[in-house]
Amino acid sequence: MKKERRDFLRLMYNSSITAALAPMLAPQEIYASDSQTFDDYKAVVYISLFGGNDAINMILPTERSGEAGYDTYADIRKNLVVSYDDLSEGLTLNTEGKLDLSSANPYDVASNLNEDAYRKGMYHIGDTGIGVNGMMPEVAQMMNENKLAVIASVGTLVVPKFDPVSKQKLSGVFPDQLFAHDRQRRLQETGQADNPTGYGWIGRLFDNLQGINGSGIITQNISFSGHNHSLVGQHTYPLELATNPAHYQTRAAGEIPTRQQLNESLTGNPFERLYNKMIGKSYSLVDELTNIWDNARIYSTLDSYGNSLFSFPSEAQINMEEAPSVSLIKSFEAIAKMIDYGKQNGLKRQVFYIEHGGYDTHSAQLDMHPKLLRELSLGLDKFQKAMDEMGMSDKVTAFTVSDFGRSVIENGDGTDHAWAGHNLVMGGAVNGGQMYGDFPLLVEQTVDESRIIPTIAIEQQFATVLKWFGVDDTLNNTLFPNLKNFSQSDLGFMKA
């Protein structure tokens, strides 16, 4: 009961109190653009791979030779190496042209061990030079369908790296506390690799887009993974929600006023009236969420295993030593419901934030990482299928971000904190099927225990998505002031 009471009060707090206090905080910037208006709906889904994803084993080179090639990777990675074998023949399609894993899994291994499936091989994506880890057949198929792209060697970066690389020449490149989880996430959240103290870039965006979604109780920036600073602006604060409103239905008896008590509390001291007003607002929000969930779309599209779209495959179907969790898929389902609601109710722009945790693989990587990649691939595929069925594919773009990449050199049981990694971007508006940027030269372009230096700044990734979102160059440069240090503010992975 106490936990449920805390959750309900947290919902109230995040949707009311902090939103009221935010305008009182000291301003940190003068907005450079007039408010924009939109006549369509678009949404962005921000997926944080929490802990530092080993993207080197998620997206691999298929070119054999060279210091950015597979042979160099295999020589360095040793125990963690993913086989060069091409699993693409296992990507069978059903009569509807959709990926069909119901009869055979391309990553299937006789041992049924996660680590053997993880290292079995990869899907070679045509002649692109890209290989996708065998645990991610759906991601490989979306690459083949041009619905998903890879952004290579991206990270927190203040100015472009120097070449040739040496630690002495990187004094202007290193962001603050480079290998610290909290600090690197905060630099991503502010959208400024040299400023961890500012408001979040998504919050600042909606500070400048005040009023575009009307005054309804469902707001423009929503987290299904608790607090994230990127959503907090000077005048903007997100809703932080559970993936099912039933989470809020149980009340601690005698501790939270009932609706009748609220109606009877029209008088009293000012603090009591304010408290009751905010409790009433939270009740209204729970009612609205419950209505959204009760009337949510039922999808006819099936997942890769022939199951209902947002169900999770059985352990027998998924054929792994231990099946992944279901948390990410539940988050994607909740976002799909909110997008359907937003489009039907005249909202114009929304951003959703979710986390997928467990990527801090200092140890037991061969057991942990395959489960994470499998769930990520399933979740992305289910969500994209939902957007396709809703006719919203070209209106919704999802991308991944992680604290940082992992070290190229394995530590005997896993990998350690590093710098650059590879991110994914997905949707009908993505120029998919290719990689933006280049695989790193694993020998020459590394520093400090084989940590890859980014060649693309995370702000460039964000700015490219926001340009598609409808944000003009002036506001983009205000949100991401370090963009001026780079030759490209638009990386080209989004369609015009």
Image (spheres, helix red, strand yellow):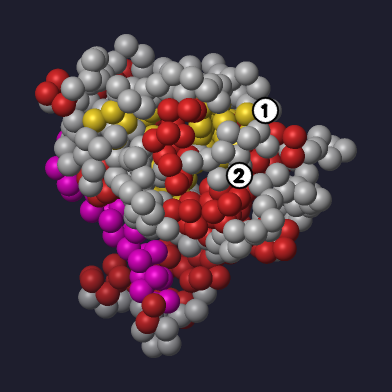
Instruction: Examine the residues drawn in magenta and state their main secondary structure.
Output: helix
N-terminal of the two: label 2 or label 1? 2
Q: Which residue is mark 2?
A: 120
Residue type indicated by callout 2: Lys
**Residue 21 belongs to magenta span:** yes
Residue sitting at 25 percent across and 49 percent down? 182
Where residue 32 appears, as percent x and y from the top left, is 26, 22
Whether residue 402 is visible to the viewer of this picture, yes or no, is: yes
The residue mark sitting in front, 2 or 1, is 2
Number of callouts: 2
Quadrant of residue 483 within the rendered picture: top left
Q: Residue furthest bottom?
A: 254
Q: Which residue is mark 1?
A: 144
Residue sitting at 54 percent across and 66 percent down? 245
| Vertical placement of residue 474 versus 239, above or below | above
Q: Residues within 10 Å of mark 1 (few under 14, many from 20)?
A: some
Q: Which element is circle 1 on?
A: helix
Residue sitting at 36 percent across and 45 percent down? 410
Instruction: Between residue 466 and residue 490, name the one nearer to us.
Output: 490
The N terminus: image quadrant: bottom left
Say if mark 2 contacts mark 1, CB within 8 Å: no
Q: Which element is circle 2 on?
A: loop
**Residue 300 belongs to magenta span:** no
Residue type indicated by callout 1: Asn
Whether residue 392 is visible to the viewer of this picture, yes or no, is: no
Q: Residue furthest right?
A: 95
Q: Which residues are magenta?
A: 4-33
